[in-house]
Image (cartoon, rainbow, N blue to C red):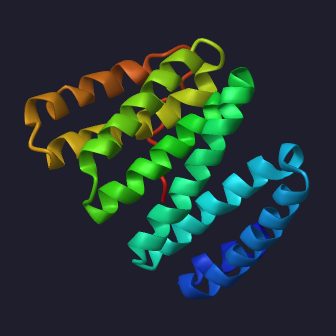
Amino acid sequence: MNRAIRPLKREGRPAEALAPVEKAVDIDRRLAVADPGAHARSLAASLSNLGKRFSELGRREEAMAAEQEALEIYRRLAAGNPDVRESDLALALGCWAWVRYEARVELHEALRAIEEALRLYDKLLPLAAARYVPDRAEALRLQANLLESLGRHPEAEDIPGQLAANEDEPGSQKRTPPRIGH
């Protein structure tokens, strides 16, 4: 399904990219009902992808609902197998926080979520710095945006220093990643 979506997004046709993603969610949902252990992660990924598509279309409520459901699934998966699934949970927390930041709602909750994601990335960095440094940098940028939006300017001003330290992590590719979620 992702192969069908990419050209539509590149051509500036995000509305047309929605139908294949909705179909993927429907298929993954049925599979997850039949065998949750085998298909819950795929359902969560499809739901997060759906949240991103809704967000691109300005359908904020639907984006938040999809990201909420994805986050709940990732939390269950991480609780059952934290060593394998905490990276998924960290990314899901970032997506959940992003759609709320973008909609300018529940900003305090979004900040708590991104702080939780950062704690997870800090735990994951020693295991595979090159893999997690870019995601942590995105989470730090979102944290700075949320702090600014909440009027906590001095705290937001500390983030560039953390980003610089992030780039000094072993294995860092010292690249600037795209903004979280989109």
Q: Residue at x 75, y 77 (%)?
A: 23
Q: Residue at x 14, y 45 (%)?
A: 150
Quarter of the image where one finds residue 153: top left
Residue 173 in the image: state x and y as whole percent.
55, 29
Q: Does residue 156 appear to the left or right of 133 in the view shown?
A: left
| Residue 178 in sight from this viewpoint | no
| Above-or-below relation of 162 to 153 | above
Quarter of the image where one finds residue 76: top right
Residue 100 in the image: state x and y as whole percent.
35, 57
| Residue 64 in sight from this viewpoint | yes
In this view, the residue in front, 58 or 28, is 28
Residue 147 in the image: state x and y as whole percent.
20, 40
Quarter of the image where one finds residue 80: top right
Q: Does residue 165 appear to the left or right of 177 in the view shown?
A: left
In this view, the residue in front, 2 or 169, is 2
Q: Residue at x 68, y 23 (%)?
A: 82
Question: Quadrant where the N terminus lies?
Answer: bottom right
Q: Residue at x 25, y 60 (%)?
A: 104
Residue 166 in the image: state x and y as whole percent.
41, 22
Q: Does residue 150 appear to the left or right of 163 in the view shown?
A: left
Total number of numbered discs in the rendering:
0
